[in-house]
Each structure stands twice: as C-alpha cells, then as structure tokens.
Image: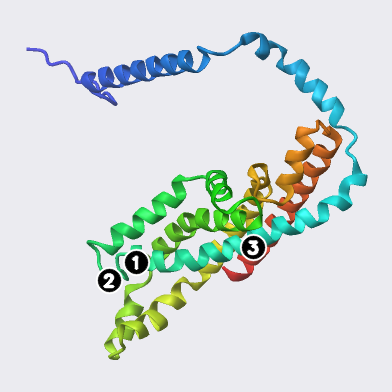
Amino acid sequence: MTEFPQTWAFRTPRARLALWFGWLCLVALFVYCWQVMTSTTIWMFIWDAPRQAADIGSRMFPPRLSYLPELMIPLWDTLNMATLGTMLGVILAVPVAFLAARNTTPSALILRPVALFIIVASRSINSLIWALLLVAILGPGLLAGIIAIGLRSIGFIGKLMYEAIEETDIRQIEAVTATGASPAQVLNYAIVPQIMPAFWGITVFRWDINIRESAILGLVGAGGLGLKLQASLNTLAWPQVTTILLVILATVIVSEWVSARVRSAII
C-alpha cells in the first residue's frame, strides 16, 4: 500500500475555520458600528467640511501677534497649574503606590485592592471631567484646575511607581533585612534608593503631560490659556486663536525639551 507523505500546515483546518469566523465577526461588528455612528450624520455637512475648513483657515492667518502681551499672565497661570497639580499628584500618588505594590503593602487583602481602585478610578476620568466637577463645586478659577490635574495624575504616577517598587532587586532588600533593620529602615535604605531614578523620571514626564492638559482646562472655567482660547472662539477672533495655539505649541515644545534633558540627566 502506497503511503502519501503528509504536508505540513501552519494551522489545522479547524484553526483556519475559527480564524476566518473571527475575521467575519470583526467585519460584521465594524459594519454595525459604522451604521450606528452614521445613522444621524448629515452628509451635506461632511461634503461641505473642506470648504468650511479652508474658510476658517484663511481667517486664522496671519496671527495677531499684538495679542501676545495679554497671554503672558494666562501662560504663567497654566505653568503654575501644571506644576502645582503635579506636586499634588505626587504627594497623593506615592503613598497609594506603596500600598498597591505587593512587596510593600501592609494588607494584600484590603489596602492593596483599595489602592488599585484609586489608581484605576483616577486614570478612568479625564482631567476635563475632573475640572468640570470641581468648577461646579469650587467655582471657576485655578484652584479647580490644580486639583483636577492632581487627581488625574494620581493614576499615572501611582501605576508606574508601584510597578517600579515591585521590580526592585530583592537581594538588596534581603541584605538590609539581614542586618536587623526595621521595616521603616528597609524601606528607606533598600527600596527608596532603587526607585528614586524612576520616581524623578515619572514626575518630570507627568509634568510635561500636565502642561498640555492645563492649556485646555480653561475651556471649562479652570483658568489659564484655555480661558483665553474659549473667549476668542466665542467671539470668532480667529487670528487670536492662531496666536494662542502657537503659544501652546511653543510651550509644549519647550516643556518636552526640558523633560527630555532632565530625564536623560537622571536616568
């Protein structure tokens, strides 16, 4: 009886069938989502969008550079909002990170889930939503923006920090513990020195992000450049809008450069 050689296949017939069925479901889901998104779309506006964009773009140039002096104080407010909000976020996030890390939490059954919930909750709510809530509670102004930035920063800093704490070298911790050190001394001499480079890198990186977010919180009444941007949009002062956007762009570029230099110097 002649035996035919078996041919090698990357996937079995059942696996290929399951793969094709998965792609079919994905395409069907995409079609359904597209129908949901476009069910209320007025396509006349879509076809007219390029002309409208070109019209607004022509009104935005040249930028009104004489408006720059009026942006200096809002720019300073934006930088202060980002800096103080980052400091608030760090103060709140560091204890949460130590409670969330497996190797430093005093209670893995109670405190660690609570800390992880705080981190997830902070990351789930955008800074604009925090600012909307705080403006409604505290009224418009920089304080609402600072607290919004701080609350938003807890999740980012806390998550990266507790991961850095869990990745510490256990041998250094065991060496300090073997000397008879107390838990506070182990924390101070074995864990903290290992996470300090990550701590400063995360803090500076978050400060850089917070500058971008602070620039638009004024849209909901939290002060800064966003307040001027909202006023210019409401009055259709398009050259002023261009000037504000250029100031925001320049600020973000400078903050990105400072953040990169500081992180390279630390790490």
Q: Position of residue 224 (x, y in %)?
A: 72, 52
Q: Earlier in the sequence, mark 2 or mark 3?
A: 3
Residue at the image position 83 percent from the left and 33 percent from the top? 238
- Mark with earlier residue (3, 1): 3
25 or 86: nearer the viewer: 86
Q: Label for residue 106?
A: 2
**Real-space CA distance between mark 3 and mark 1, rounded to the nearest whole angstrom:** 25 Å
Q: Residue at x 56, y 64 (%)?
A: 203
What secondary structure is marked by label 1?
helix
Name the residue located 35 percent from the left edge and 60 percent from the top edge. Answer: 115
Residue 83: mark: 3
Label 2: how many Cα within 10 Å (few below 14, some 14–19, many 20+): some
Q: Are marks 1 and 2 in contact (CB under 8 Å)?
A: yes
Q: Which residue is mark 1?
A: 99
Q: Position of residue 61 (x, y in %)?
A: 88, 32
Marks 1 and 3: in contact by CB < 8 Å? no
Q: Residue at x 79, y 44 (%)?
A: 244
The 10 Å Cα crowd at callout 3, few under 14, some 14 to 19, many 20 or more, is many
Please state if 5 lies on the left or on the right of 170 as rendered. Answer: left
Residue 235, compared with residue 192, is above or below; it is above
Check disc 3 and give the amino acid type.
Thr
Q: Nearer the viewer, residue 144 or 253?
A: 144
What secondary structure is found at the residue carrying circle 2? Answer: loop
Identity of the amino acid at label 1?
Answer: Leu
Q: Residue furthest right?
A: 66
> How many callouts does the rendering have?
3
